[in-house]
Image: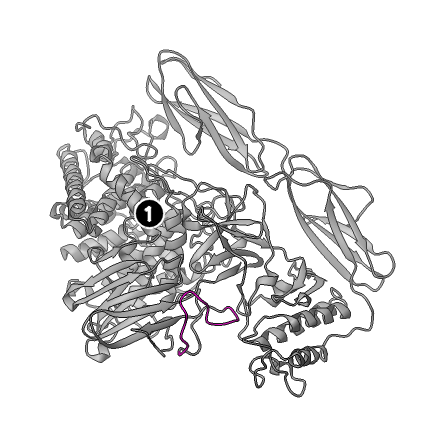
């Protein structure tokens, strides 16, 4: 990096990420190869597309815009199409106005930029010489095609600078400067970024000099447009919803500054600053609610680069603070974020589950940010996020099919009950990022440094350091340091890895302890491969070197193995996979099931919440000792649930989140008495006894567990939700459970102190019945008592019929309420949603369309109250599709099918025409008119399962208007 550009870098206050500083750097793509495991499936499917897809199709939209021969090639389609047949390639000042401008496909060119990045990344990482040469040839062909277009546009003298390169006229940029809204234009600088990023990837990974020259000319054109605008005008532009989306323009301009040594590109990058966001983020104020996620996430890498090149801490402070606002508080189980492309309220995960969550583009950018922040800090939390997101959302975003013309990736990877992934996405934004995602899985497996220039180990005089961040079957070669690593593992289906280290002399090998694995408090326990190290079920992380256990504590999420190495040294890592029930931060009743690094999806046709009961499987640390049975089709069976990994790439309808529904207060154990038989009562806020007990996820020892059971029993008896006798039954169940036992029963505390009850309280017993009895007696000596007998009344809400397979009632639902008290008749009331309480009558409550929360409460003569809540979903009407058409010249028509269903929501719109199959609607589509009428059939289905009657649209012969 040129010294002049870093003159002020690194001068920041202690505790901040220092601009320009690096703790580690990734290995080049060419030096790491993923050699096996689940990641190779998606990689190979995408590499096939890279090799067979014609470059001429990608260049067609550019050539058409420049008046060049398109060579008969059709563009990719979708958003990446030729545009309106009547559209003129207007220059910056001759746009005829919105009412007179027939336009279409206003993002065209972006997909080609992503495709060029994919080709370059794949070429840079290919370990087969023939494949590498083939991909490099396609990169060169595409770069030359773009250079030819840039020169043709310059020769026309229609544009503001000869560096202009786009697949549409410059008018979109002019209209953006006039603050035109999304709809009149799309996001012109977004497209510009994708083209420039593809060119710079071609330069970095294949050495293309022409690519750098073309990109630099584009950068000069950008500078010419933006440098003359007032700061207030630019601020208004970048704040525009989608129209002002600029991708990572600031990042590619910083890259140009470094690659060319021209500092003007740093100033150009700063012209994209959105000061309002930088200011609130740098100050630590969370104002992200309602902001377009990908529009702003893509800018964060550029802000980090600006921090490096200017030394201004504001940039790096803003990015780190924004990260903390997003992870984990706005992050779903698979690593995604956002609802309908917007960030929701702070800390809202369960509360921000809608029908279109987790745009894949956002996670593509979040991975890049995590990688960059790890380089600067070496903090394991960024690697933990990377593992979660790349293993689950990104790998799971590639459908398990082959294709010669589609990336077969997701736009949204939704998280709502009964979700379906939105596959295909030719030409969309996520189709573009999806091209890149799957050809670079090796880019963050390993990092490295030599202790100079501020890197790790500088104080040690230059020690070589390698971080192992992902446990993926792979090889890494650090040629100039004579280090080679070979990693063998079936991750993520195996909680173990074997690394052969070929190195001589001093090397610090840093092994990440995954966030889902708890490091052993004492590291001198030999682990039997494939087994857990503790009867409590807690995951442990154990390392041996040539069979010798390493007694090294984890430090900052890593175990450091530093030694004088000999070639062929074998490092073995054990981190047994455990099944975990992970709660949403804002609702402990909403959980995901996770096996090691893998989030499990429950297959089900239901589109309402699925219940899960896990009380009798829960170990001391909160992990589950559950009967997870593998099946031949790659799924697992857990009771009535069929679970698949997020990364399966299947077409099944799924549930990423489940609803806790333990009916009784029970604990893990072989003694039947570990199930108390006491109903799992809920407080007024909806939190049940078990929700409250396990709200922190687990316990450090059995004493802590019993302590918490006692506290929670007192709370629920005091609230009248449990009787004193029920409280005692719960304590007996806890005492007779196996939760927290290691090799036997725990001894009894002394002097009546409950905190002394547990494994740390004295000599560990070995299963003597008297020890168990003493432990139980110690608990019962402090059991809750009550001046009255009995507890709050029992109350039930009973549906008259079962819902459909979707979980929705397709006709009005009828509910009755029953209640009983220990003495006398209780008073029973009902509340519908947030309405007033009303006495429950003898007649059933009839519910019409909507998602209803029905609450029943019963109060006895002593004022004790119990509530139950039932969510009931009713949708009796099918959606209705609205059809609009738009003529595309004399022989074409664009058809837009839009359906409304304000109850369960539209699940899909299917259509078919002559010589076509039933297709699922995604975007407006076009049809060529012929000499005879054509009939298009269509029908919408909602998430409840209602389908509108099949309707028809008649397309008349050419030159006649279509009719519905």
The residue carrying pointer 1 sits among few (fewer than 14), some (14 to 19) or many (20 or more) residues within 10 Å by Cα, namely some
Q: Is residue 963 left or right of residue 553?
A: right
Residue toward you, 192 or 70: 70
Q: Main secondary structure of the magenta part?
A: loop
Color style of the picture: one colour
Q: Residue at x 29, y 24 (%)?
A: 85
Q: Is residue 703 left or right of residue 924?
A: right
Tag 1's secondary structure? Answer: helix
How many circles with numbers are drawn on the protein?
Answer: 1
Task: Please tell me whether residue 344 is drawn above or below residue 806 in the rendered image.
Answer: below
Q: Is residue 555 left or right of residue 936?
A: left
Image coords of residue 552 (percent x, y) = 35, 78
Give the position of the N terminus as an image quadrant.
bottom left
Image coords of residue 513 (percent x, y) = 38, 68
Q: Is residue 650 visible?
A: yes
Q: Residue at x 57, y 52 (%)?
A: 639
Residue toward you, 252 or 264: 252
Image coords of residue 278 (percent x, y) = 36, 59
Q: State which quadrant residue 709 falls in.
A: bottom right
Q: Residue at x 79, y 63 (%)?
A: 864
Q: Is residue 781 left or right of residue 580?
A: right
Q: Which residues are magenta?
A: 524-537
Q: State which quadrant residue 682 falls in.
A: bottom right
Q: Which residue is mark 1?
A: 41
Image coords of residue 44 (percent x, y) = 29, 45
Q: Outermost residue, bottom direction? A: 751
Asked whether residue 97 is drawn in magenta, I would say no
Q: Is residue 223 visible?
A: no
């Amino acid at each position: 990096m040129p010294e002049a550009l870093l003159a002020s870098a690194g001068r920041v206050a202690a505790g901040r990420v220092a601009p320009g500083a690096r703790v580690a750097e990734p290995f080049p793509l060419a030096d790491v190869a993923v050699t096996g495991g689940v990641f190779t499936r998606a990689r190979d499917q995408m590499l096939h597309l890279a090799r067979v897809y014609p470059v001429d199709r990608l260049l067609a939209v550019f050539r058409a815009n420049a008046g060049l021969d398109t060579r008969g090639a059709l563009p990719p389609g979708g958003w990446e199409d030729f545009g309106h047949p009547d559209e003129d390639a207007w220059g910056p000042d001759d746009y005829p106005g919105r009412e007179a401008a027939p336009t279409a496909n206003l993002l065209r060119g972006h997909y080609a930029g992503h495709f060029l990045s994919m080709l370059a990344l794949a070429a840079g990482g290919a370990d087969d010489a023939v494949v590498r040469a083939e991909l490099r040839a396609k990169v060169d062909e595409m770069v030359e095609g773009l250079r030819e277009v840039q020169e043709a546009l310059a020769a026309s003298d229609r544009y503001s600078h000869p560096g202009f390169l786009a697949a549409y006229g410059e008018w979109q940029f002019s209209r953006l400067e006039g603050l035109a809204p999304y709809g009149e234009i799309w996001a012109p600088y977004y497209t510009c970024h994708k083209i420039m990023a593809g060119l710079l990837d071609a330069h970095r990974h294949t050495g293309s000099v022409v690519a750098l020259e073309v990109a630099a000319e584009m950068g000069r054109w950008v500078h010419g447009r933006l440098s003359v605008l007032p700061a207030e005008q630019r601020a208004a532009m970048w704040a525009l919803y989608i129209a002002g989306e600029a991708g990572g323009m600031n990042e590619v301009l910083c890259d140009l500054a470094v690659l060319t040594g021209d500092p003007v590109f740093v100033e150009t990058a700063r012209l994209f600053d959105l000061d309002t966001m930088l200011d609130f983020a740098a100050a630590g104020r969370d104002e992200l609610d309602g902001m377009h996620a990908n529009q702003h996430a893509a800018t964060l890498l550029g802000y980090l680069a600006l921090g490096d090149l200017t030394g201004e801490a504001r940039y790096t402070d803003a990015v780190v603070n924004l990260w903390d606002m997003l992870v984990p508080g706005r992050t779903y189980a698979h690593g995604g974020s956002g609802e309908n492309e917007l960030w929701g309220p702070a800390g809202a995960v369960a509360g921000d589950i809608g029908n279109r969550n987790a745009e894949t583009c956002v996670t593509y950018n979040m991975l890049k940010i995590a990688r960059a922040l790890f380089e600067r800090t070496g903090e394991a939390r960024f690697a933990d996020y990377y593992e979660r997101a790349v293993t689950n959302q990104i790998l799971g975003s590639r459908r398990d099919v082959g294709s010669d013309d589609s990336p077969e990736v997701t736009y949204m990877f939704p998280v709502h009950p009964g979700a379906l992934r939105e596959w295909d996405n030719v030409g969309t934004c996520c189709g573009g990022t999806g091209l890149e995602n799957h050809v670079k899985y090796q880019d963050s497996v390993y990092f490295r440094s030599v202790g100079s220039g501020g890197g790790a180990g500088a104080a040690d005089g230059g020690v070589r350091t390698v971080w192992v961040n992902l446990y993926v079957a792979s090889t890494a070669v650090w040629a100039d340091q004579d280090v080679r690593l070979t990693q063998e593992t079936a991750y993520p289906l195996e909680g173990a890895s074997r690394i052969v280290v070929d190195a001589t002399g001093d090397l610090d090998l840093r092994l990440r302890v995954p966030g889902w694995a708890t490091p052993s408090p004492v590291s001198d326990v030999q682990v039997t491969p494939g087994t857990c190290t503790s009867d409590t079920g807690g995951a442990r992380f154990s390392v041996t070197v040539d069979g010798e256990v390493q007694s090294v504590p984890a430090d900052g999420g890593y175990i450091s193995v530093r030694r004088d190495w000999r070639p062929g040294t074998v490092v073995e890592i054990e981190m047994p996979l455990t099944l975990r029930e992970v709660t949403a931060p804002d609702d402990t009743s909403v959980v995901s099931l996770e096996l090691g690094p893998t989030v499990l999806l429950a297959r089900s046709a239901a589109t309402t919440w699925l219940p899960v009961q896990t009380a009798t499987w829960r170990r001391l640390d909160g992990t589950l000792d559950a009967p997870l049975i593998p099946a031949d089709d790659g799924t697992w069976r857990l009771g009535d649930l069929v679970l698949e990994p997020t990364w399966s790439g299947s077409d099944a309808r799924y549930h990423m989140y489940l609803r806790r529904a333990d009916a009784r207060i029970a604990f893990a154990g072989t003694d039947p008495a570990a199930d108390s038989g006491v109903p799992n009562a809920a407080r007024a806020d909806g939190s049940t006894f078990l929700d409250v007990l396990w709200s922190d996820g687990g316990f450090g020892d059995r004493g802590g567990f019993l302590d918490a059971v006692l506290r929670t029993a007192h709370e629920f008896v005091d609230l009248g939700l449990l009787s004193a006798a029920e409280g005692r039954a719960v304590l007996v169940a806890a005492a007779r459970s196996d939760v927290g036992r290691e090799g036997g029963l725990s001894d009894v505390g002394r002097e009546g102190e409950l905190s002394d009850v547990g494994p740390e309280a004295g000599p560990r017993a070995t299963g003597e019945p008297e020890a168990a009895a003493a432990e139980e007696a110690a608990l019962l000596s402090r059991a809750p008592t009550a001046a009255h007998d009995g507890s709050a009344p029992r109350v039930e809400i009973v549906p008259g019929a079962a819902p459909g397979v979707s979980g929705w009632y397709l006709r009005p639902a009828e509910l009755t309420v029953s209640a009983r008290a220990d003495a006398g008749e209780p008073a029973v009331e009902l509340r519908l949603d947030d309405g007033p309480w009303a006495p429950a009558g003898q007649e059933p409550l009839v519910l019409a369309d909507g998602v209803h929360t029905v609450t029943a409460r019963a109060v006895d003569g002593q004022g004790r109250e119990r509530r139950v809540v039932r969510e009931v979903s009713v949708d009796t009407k099918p959606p209705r599709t609205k059809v609009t058409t738009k003529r595309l010249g004399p022989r074409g028509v664009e058809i837009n099918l839009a359906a409304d269903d304000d109850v369960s929501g539209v699940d899909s719109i299917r259509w078919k025409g002559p010589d076509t199959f039933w297709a699922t609607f995604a975007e407006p589509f076009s049809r060529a008119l012929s000499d005879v009428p054509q009939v298009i059939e269509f029908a919408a289905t909602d998430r409840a399962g209602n389908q509108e009657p099949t309707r028809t649209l008649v397309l008349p012969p050419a030159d006649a208007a279509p009719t519905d």
